[in-house]
Amino acid sequence: MQTTPVKRETENVKVLYVLSHPIQYFSQLLKELSEVIDMEVCYYSDISIKGGMDKDFGQKIAWDIPLLEGYKYFFLKNYRAGHVVNNKFLDVWNPGVWKVVQKSDAKVIIVNDWTYSSTWLLFLIARMKGKKVWVRADNPVSLEYQKSKKVLAIKKLVLKHILFKWFIDKCMYTGLQSREFYKFYGVPEKRLVFTPHAVNNEFFQAANIKDKSELQRIKSEKKIPVEKKIILFVGKYISRKRPFDLLQAFASLNSNDYYLVLAGEGLLRPDIEKWIAERKLQNVLLTGFVNQSELPLYYSMADVFVLCSDVETWGLAVNEAMNFAKPVIVSDSCGCSSDLVKHGQNGFVFKTGDTEQLTTCLKKLLEDDRFRENAGMRSLEIINGYSVGSIVSNIQTALHS
């Protein structure tokens, strides 16, 4: 069941929401928050609006959905204009954030992550002005256990003993792994707010193409034989997404009944093409960059969705696939694996890098039509609990607590 935000008076709790740049996954959240909260959005960079270079895709990217509609916003002057925004400390530099926070009448400032230099400047002035600062991040605790003792010692000093202790009032977690991350760094339960990672469920569910004849037409248009069962990957062709694991598992299936679609683009494309050619692998489609408006076509066609990353703080493509009632196979390094995947019910979680296990999971879903269909319906049930409305309602409750 979708959670609907409660309409109530919030004029006395003005919010400033600070983001690095307009992001397609946040647009609906910002719009719905603005409908029930007196809120303004501040951006460090406009690179995603101008169609800036994405180094992982290996090309300039301009999203074809509105990113700035339905809410108030402004851009700060960025002295790193044109620079790729990729979660590095100096990807942006906005000294104007000092004046913005100083003059703002917002009682609460929400920031996404603590990565950027401008955000640390914001922390300082917000504390000096007595404003409440909330941080929303999706860091999974599982990645912390992979770090060296030296790195963990430094992070505990910075996060546990400085940032979370002196500068952050509430921590907004996106799932179980995120919740445990905050607790790992000493944040008490009373300061935690659940804001589940979500996509625009209504948009994707409405875009699901269920008519079989229409799906056959789309397959034919994409030059995919209509009788093939489709395994779908959506994302960048980069090392941390481990596309070769999926290629190896697909090759191990050794069946002409299946078709692998890698919906995306990236720097590994030449290596992927070479790998496919050397093994004379058939039934593989590399789509190139797929924009938001076209993605539903691929999700609708798919029979199984796979995400096999070795570093993935969440994996919002899994949310998207589940909105199309698709079973999902996800590596245990993906942050969403603890929340969205009920092993053996709506799909499987496999050990990262274990291509034999991944192959087995694919076989179980592809060879059992009834199980695959039931798993897809279970995915849809689960994802309805991870909605933008849930985030808005929980933020409202926290603002009034």
Image (spheres, helix red, strand yellow):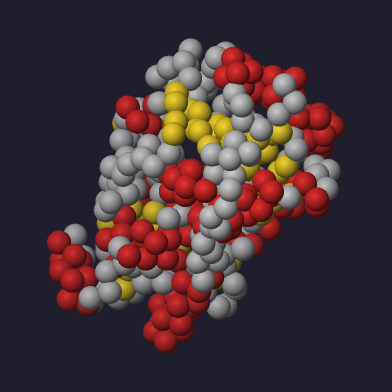
Residue at x 27%, y 56% (from the top left corner): 285
Where residue 353 appears, as percent x and y from the top left, is 56, 56
Residue 268 in sight here? no
Residue 81 in sight here? yes
Where residue 96 appears, as percent x and y from the top left, is 55, 14
Q: Is residue 121 above or below residue 224?
A: above
Q: Residue furthest bottom?
A: 370
Residue at x 39%, y 26% (from the top left corner): 47
Q: In this view, does 304 lie to the left or right of 176?
A: left
Q: In this view, does 121 lie to the left or right of 94?
A: right
Q: Classify residue 342 by image quadrant.
A: bottom right
Q: Classify residue 161 by image quadrant.
A: top right
What is the total number of numbered labels drawn onto the structure image? 0
Q: Nearer the viewer, residue 93 or 347?
A: 93
Residue at x 32%, y 27% (from the top left corner): 50
Where residue 27 appears, as percent x and y from the top left, is 43, 44
Q: Classify residue 377 by image quadrant.
A: bottom left
Residue at x 42%, y 55% (from the top left corner): 200
Q: Is residue 102 above or below residue 346?
A: above
Q: Nearer the viewer, residue 292 or 271?
A: 292
Q: Is residue 216 above or below residue 306?
A: below
Q: Which of 182 and 236 is in front in this view?
A: 182
Where residue 308 appears, as percent x and y from the top left, is 51, 56
